Image (tube, grey):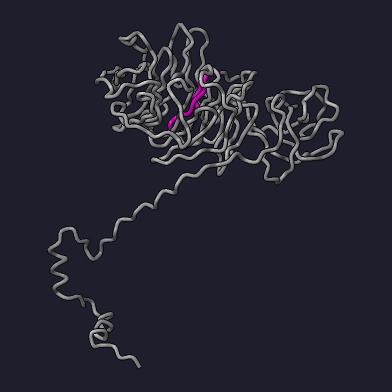
Amino acid sequence: MRLFPLAGVSAFLCLGVVACSSGTDEQAASQDPTAPSPTEQPAPTAPPEPPIGARPVCAAVAADAKTLGRGCSGTGYNDSVCVVSGASSSCGTNACIFDGRGESTFSLTCAPTCTVGSAEACPLGFECVDTTADCSGAKTGVCAPTATCAPGVKASQLFEGAAGELYGLDFDGKTAKLFTKRNGVFPPVVTFDTTSSPSVSAVVRNGTRVLVVTSTHEILLENGKGVATPRAKPANGSYDGAFGVAADGRFVKLDQPNDSFAALSRRNDDGTWTEVGPTRQRLKSVRAMGKGFLALCQGQLCASTDGESFTPVAPPPGVTFDEKTTWSAAGLAADDFYFTARGQLFRFKKGVWVEEGPRAPELPATTSSGYADKLVVGANGTAAFHTWNGTSYTTYVSVAGCWRVTPSGYASSAIVGDALAYTNVESKLCTVPIR
């Protein structure tokens, strides 16, 4: 039998006693102002953020990019979903799908067939469903369109609000109207007279406030209300600039310099801007993130949280680019963004780079900006990557674990919450769920 020393027995007996600690320890604790009280619980610590990882392109059903989403002709039956046999319009390798379950852009659409339950997903904007009737053809799964459209709602441009709500801008030749979507209707938020169609050049979100910069006006949105202010002509005569949010939460803008010091201005509560001074580095090709900016500093990528001081950012491993390279970036912050150059897509977060799955054929570095890759990142972090494949845009959207693709592209769409929003050829405002 093992014998325990007497001190161990005393410690055991103290379990039922209210106070058994030594006076020395109590005195030391009372003399230390930083020591927690006996009843104080330590503050919970946030779990470490998991490292980012590269996401592949989702396994997808093969689709004919040239005809996907186009209308075709044939005969369908009531509310059925089926493949039309002997369709008069050619869909290439796609099938002519009839979907009579509800109003859609086209009841007859060119789309591929699929296998319900397969790991291969339909292109973005379509979902694999079982046919409900036989349109004189074999019964099989079909990629049915998932877009829902509102007739008669015109919008030249769409964008997302601070809480994932939909906004649209329309112009009738004299008056511009900014509207939103509420409970299935589209009430105006603010209207203003203008002699030219306003084009949205920046949408900057800061908490519950959104600054919408157009070619003619600045619109401040907050709590469902909007105030439009005509843009004052800048001293340098140019309306170009990068609008963003600084680390202190103020709306700021940087003029677009050509390898020179840029003027930094802050927006006042009355809608005017005050120049606060030049940047501390020579800049070129400034891009605004959700908060902060990216730019080129003497040909090297650099980042800033306040729009004034920029620090170098090492390029992705194995990637070289210069001032002639066409590149793009978008993200929630200057330390959390997506970056594309030469057909490759990367994500940078807190000092770490990963290459994402989408990769397009590399185009010449001098490719026209009209065909440059486009990046959009929503308020919830969902990203859309529109890349030019030489003849058209292909769109990739980040979903759980991979990138969903559609060959037809939604290059003029906006991320709004968990959907893509766009205006179709019939002037209908449509949304496609992202999942």
Tell me what residue is drawn at x 44 percent, y 49 percent.
50
Tell me what residue is drawn at x 63 percent, y 22 percent.
392
Quadrant where the image shows the C terminus: top right
Residue 115 in the image, given as x and y percentages of width and height: 74, 42
Residue 234 in the image, given as x and y percentages of width and height: 33, 11
Determine if the magenta segment contains residue 285. Answer: no
Residue 209 in view: no
Q: Observer-nearest residue: 256 or 301?
A: 301
Determine if the magenta segment contains residue 164. Answer: yes
Tell me which corner region of the image, top left, top right, bottom left or bottom right, holds residue 218.
top left
Tell me which corner region of the image, top left, top right, bottom left or bottom right, holds residue 126.
top right
**From the viewer's perspective, is residue 46 above or below residue 135?**
below
* Outermost residue, top side: 195
**From the viewer's perspective, is residue 198 above or below residue 40?**
above
Residue 390 in view: yes
Quadrant where the image shows the N terminus: bottom left
Tell me what residue is drawn at x 26 percent, y 84 percent.
8
Residue 242 horizontal side relative to residue 372, left or right: left
Residue 412 in the image, given as x and y percentages of width and height: 56, 22
Residue 291 horizontal side relative to residue 408, left or right: left
* Outermost residue, bottom side: 1
Residue 242 in the image, given as x and y percentages of width and height: 38, 21
Tell me which corner region of the image, top left, top right, bottom left or bottom right, holds residue 65.
top right
Q: Which residues are magenta?
A: 155-168
- Count of numbered marks: 0
Residue 286 horizontal side relative to residue 22, left or right: right
Tell me what residue is drawn at x 43 percent, y 16 percent.
214
Q: Observer-nearest residue: 338 or 204?
A: 338
